Structures are given as C-alpha cells and as structure tokens.
Image: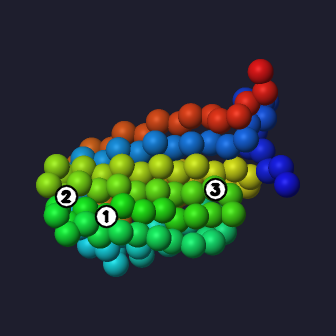
Amino acid sequence: MDHPIERGGKSYAGAHQIIDMWAPKRIDDLKFVEAALRKSVAAAGATLLHIHLHHFTVNDGVSGVAVLAESHISVHTWPERGFAAFDIFTCGNTDPEAAIAVLTAAFEPERIAVREILRGGAE
C-alpha cells in the first residue's frame, strides 16, 4: 500500500522531522513522556499501533518509539544534559507539525530546532 506525501509538486515516501530540544521539562518522567507521545500521535492524525518506552536507571533518561501505521515517532532523552531528541517520520495524510506543537507545549523547552528531510523522492 502506497501513501506518499506531496511537497512542491513532487511525491515522497515520507517526511522525517528531526526535533532537538534544549532544557525541556519532565523528560525523566516515563508516564508524562508516554502521555505526550500519545497526544502528539492524535494531533498528527496518525494511527497508533504500539508504544514501547524504556526508563534508564543510570540517568533517568527515556528512550522509545510510538510505532504508527504511517511510520513512527521516537524519543531519546538525556536529563543530565538537559536535552531531548525526537524523530517524527510520517507518510500519507498526517500533520507532523501538529505533533511538534504538542511536544513543544508538553516539554516547554528553552530552545528547539526542527529539520525536515523528505525521504524516498523520485529522482
């Protein structure tokens, strides 16, 4: 089943958003991270298949993924560095920008950087 996205008149397999957050809040709270991921999936209009998160006891960091029918949203946090990295890779009729807005509102970072990589375009 093919669910491409369109940008600038071209077709791509998907859009990959790379989100870096500095000084985000509550990135050591597993339940809060999971709730924020669930809200971001809903905001994107994506279909959640499964969430798997791991809480590291060494630094209280959280790593994991929300597997979507449209691809995934992943998270890796480093509380000791005050940093969190999210990837949102989606295809089809989804709104990754809405997911980014939910994550930004949830974690309230002092600074955020977002980059988009369009994947699988026709050459």
Q: Is residue 35 left or right of residue 4?
A: left
Instruction: Please give the name of the residue rendered at 16% of the width and 64% of the height, measured from the top-left corner.
Output: 58
- Element on which disc 3 rests: strand
Residue designated by label 1: 62
Q: In terms of secondary structure, where does tag 1 sit?
A: strand
Quarter that holds the N terminus:
bottom right
Type of the residue with mark 2: Pro
Which tag, 1 or 2, sits closer to the chain's start?
1
Residue 55: where, in percent of width, then height? Answer: 29, 70
Q: Which residue is mark 3?
A: 71
- Camera-side residue of 84 and 7: 84
Say whether marks 3 and 1 touch (CB < 8 Å).
no
Q: Which residue is mark 2?
A: 79
- Answer left or right for 108 relative to 10: left
- Label 3: few (<14), some or many (≥20) within 10 Å? some
- Front-most of residues 60 and 22: 60
Residue 51 visible within the image: yes
Distance in Å between CA atoms under marks 1 and 2: 9 Å
Task: Tell me which amino acid carries mark 3.
Answer: Ser
> Which of these two is toward me, 14 or 97?
14
